[in-house]
Image (cartoon, coloured by chain):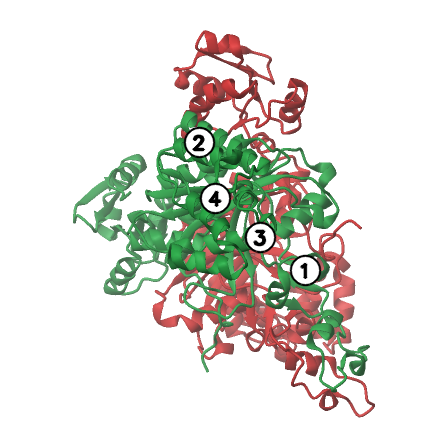
Chain colours: A green, B red
């Protein structure tokens, strides 16, 4: 029976890892130029840290780790039976599992900040790239183990932080050569909508409805709001907002007039106005910094909403259809659940799996990723191997990936190996070359072949790197 | 109540991550120049893959993951009770846990090779750097979550592979500036010992005993062998071997004569002679390749033994006392447990935690790791921020880590921030500089201060990088 892995998990082979590393290295490099540095937290957290943070559904999706040792030895199973005699799995699992696998990077980050608050310099700029686990039903594009790639700054309310995240997104996708659209909204503006339409307590219902605008259209959105108890007058106010057009500054100006009492309801929203101030400041900074990607306001953008308190971000690929590839926003109470109130932060998360699919679909991975090795020395026998070892060493010390085929197998087999591994250069240095103090190198792509003195390592290096595929 | 993490696990802060990344990046870079490429496997494996691979003790140390959904709903608890009515935790945990956390990287690698055998080009050169989990009792230097860093080549029996691993070790520690001793043994030679002393079935007992030579001394080792049933004559043969001196080639020659029947027993060991051939070939290759680190035969080296079938490696730091920092060897039946027999391979594992402690203890981390940011632009107000944003952008695009302090706080606070983060350069560009089109940059280490035209980004770049700490 062939061995297998748990459903919803994946092995990453050498090709996939090369692509994934290219993405992660690009993202990390950009994070670092903005002064963010990396932390890591354990895969297992105490369940007391995780439970209740992701809603009832989230609790069910946590992978629980059985206590080590005699986990069941002291359990009184009868006490976990309901009145009908059925076992209460949820209660019993709490009894025998103290730990669970990380469900996201946000809750561990909040835990980290509270636990280490005295060692942290605020504003605290951190990034974190680690796998998370969710017992979701696996399906295409949804896995039970996947990497998250989060960047956050906490301890500052300045819009300069929001700007930085937009700059980071812009720079990452410019380096990855993927055209993206950055969509921005503000939770305070959404609150403003609810206030000026006269249903301040319905902000969640309104936001959930307009979040679906792209998918179901305006009529269905209005129908949903009506179902939630909004009046026709209130819906008319929302409709007026959703239909706003013009440039970003024109939209902000129109909304400001509505929030100041200019809507059919005549109601004023101070929160909405504060949100518009934030949006205006952020777009001013974006203009000053010079962002290559298009950035636009999207009033239907909510992203799960209740969590965010200010800016909300989402990034879409312009040339590939796959949903959002980055998302995030500002939150004002990340660490309150762990007893440290009023820590405001803003962050975004890069969706590595989707970005991989975009690069793959658009054929944007660098060609060089295919071959992990630049030069293969064929193995022509024990003496020949000893002869070329110092050259191989010197090339490696210059950073070139060099292999010496370990066995003196038939040349056909060694050729096949080079071919399957897409190795672009092959050296067949045999007895003749040894006798004349030479090393042969052939470019397998162009067919060009050259003989070098064994002492001219620099010349070999130049030959290998001058034509190396980028 | 302050939140905490499970015992035996760790958070890695920014300083520790910088050090760890330095180690991993160095190791990965060397692996790549030898043509090894990375794979990753899931954190969770099926327990059927893991159980029985690490001995009875290992099975107990596996972290088991509770099945998701209604894990206990259909369990008949009575059927898991022993005759005395006590619950059988081991049997019940198998019933409710199908998955476990990876205990090492070797078994998942074996599983990977068998599962993907048709997609793999042999010889298969892979490395893997991922955390593993063990429910060991936590103590100083022993964690329940730690990274392993394994490099292996499988599908070739050539000693060129053994050589490569020695070269990799030598190169890694040369780059890390740590002096090491590489110790090599060969399992076939150990088998030879057992054969020529007349106790071929006692190879494990003999090896376990002489493995302790360093710790308990020759007398105690002999006492242990006597306790295992070896005769005085047999022990005399072992003693003769352990007392061999001279150069590596002299030692090999002496052992060859013993294995050919020259020992007091007069017995011959073909296996031992094969092991000596391998050692001789490997040391010949080591001489040809030129290894900077000392490499020596250590006949007492066994490293858990039963697993290895040929070369055995161990690496020790010469200037820091901490046990072995790398270890490995050749195995002939990695994948047999999963139904693919006769796959020979050789590999070593780098102990990242110990290497970290060595670099830390010897103060060998590059000084630059302390500061993640090179230049901080103080925030002198909204206009000043907009003024310097394009400069910050241009420097970041040149790879410099630049921060713009997000809030226009008191300068003292901004200074403190730069100080705590060890940021070496500070720019205080205010209204005066704006008026004259300039940017100020101060080297906080030397005190040197310079004014640049805002358009001379290259000059600023040169100022920042010419004195950057290495």
Give yes or no for contact between labels 1 and 3 (Cβ–Cβ under 8 Å): no
Q: Which residue is mark 2?
A: A253
Residue drawn 44% across and 43% down? A241
Which is more toward the observer, A413 or A138?
A138
Vertical order, B219 against A20 (above or below): below
Which is more toward the observer, B121 or A318?
A318
Label disc, if present, on residue A52 of the rendered structure: 1
Give yes or no for contact between labels 4 and 2 (Cβ–Cβ under 8 Å): no
Q: Residue furthest bottom?
A: B83
- Using the rendered image, report if marks 1 and 3 lie on a common chain: yes
Q: Chain of mark 1?
A: A
Query: First in sequence: mark 4 or mark 3?
Result: 3
Query: First in sequence: mark 3 or mark 2?
Result: 3
| Label 2 element class | helix
Q: Position of residue A35 (x, y in %)?
A: 54, 33
Query: First in sequence: mark 1 or mark 4?
Result: 1
Q: Chain of mark 4?
A: A
Label disc, if present, on residue A202 of the rendered structure: 3
Vertical order, B438 against A338 (above or below): above
Could you say which quadrant of the image residue A310 lies in? top right
């Amino acid at each position: 029976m062939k061995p297998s892995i748990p459903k919803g998990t994946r092995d990453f082979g050498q090709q996939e890892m090369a692509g994934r590393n290219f993405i992660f290295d690009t993202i990390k490099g950009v994070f670092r130029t903005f002064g963010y540095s990396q932390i890591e937290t354990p895969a297992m957290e105490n369940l007391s840290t995780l439970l209740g943070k992701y809603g009832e559904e989230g609790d069910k999706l946590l992978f629980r780790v059985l206590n080590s040792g005699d986990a069941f030895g002291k359990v009184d199973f009868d006490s976990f039976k309901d009145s009908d005699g059925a076992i209460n799995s949820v209660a019993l699992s709490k009894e025998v599992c103290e730990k669970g696998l990380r469900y996201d990077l946000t809750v561990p980050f909040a835990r980290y900040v509270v636990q280490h608050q005295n060692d942290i310099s605020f504003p605290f700029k951190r990034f974190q790239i680690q796998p998370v686990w969710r017992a979701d039903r696996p399906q295409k594009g949804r896995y039970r183990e996947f990497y998250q790639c989060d960047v956050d700054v906490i301890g500052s309310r300045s819009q300069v932080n929001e700007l930085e995240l937009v700059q980071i997104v812009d720079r990452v996708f410019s380096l990855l050569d993927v055209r993206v659209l950055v969509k921005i909204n503000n939770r305070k503006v959404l609150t403003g909508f609810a206030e000026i339409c006269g249903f301040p307590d319905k902000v969640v219902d309104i936001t959930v409805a307009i979040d679906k605008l792209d998918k179901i259209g305006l009529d269905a959105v209005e129908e949903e709001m009506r179902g939630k108890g909004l009046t026709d007058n209130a819906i008319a106010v929302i409709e007026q907002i959703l239909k706003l057009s013009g440039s970003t500054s024109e939209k902000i100006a129109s909304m400001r007039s509505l929030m100041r009492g200019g809507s059919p309801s005549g109601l004023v929203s101070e929160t909405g106005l504060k949100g518009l101030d934030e949006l205006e400041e952020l777009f001013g900074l974006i203009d000053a910094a010079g962002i290559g990607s298009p950035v636009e306001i999207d009033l239907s953008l909510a992203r799960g909403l209740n969590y965010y308190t200010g800016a909300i971000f989402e990034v879409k690929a312009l040339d590939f259809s796959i949903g959002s590839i980055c998302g995030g926003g500002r939150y004002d109470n990340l660490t309150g659940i762990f007893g440290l109130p009023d820590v405001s932060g803003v962050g975004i998360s890069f969706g590595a799996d989707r970005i991989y699919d975009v690069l793959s679909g658009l054929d944007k991975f660098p060609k060089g990723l295919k071959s992990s090795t630049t030069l293969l020395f064929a193995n022509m026998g024990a003496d020949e191997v000893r002869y070329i070892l110092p050259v191989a060493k010197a090339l490696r010390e210059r950073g070139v990936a060099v292999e010496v085929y370990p066995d003196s197998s038939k040349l056909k087999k060694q050729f096949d190996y080079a071919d399957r591994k897409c190795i672009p250069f092959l050296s067949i240095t045999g007895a003749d070359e040894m006798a004349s103090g030479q090393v042969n190198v052939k470019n397998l792509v162009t067919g060009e072949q050259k003989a070098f003195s064994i002492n001219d390592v620099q010349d070999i290096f130049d030959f290998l790197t001058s034509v190396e595929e980028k």
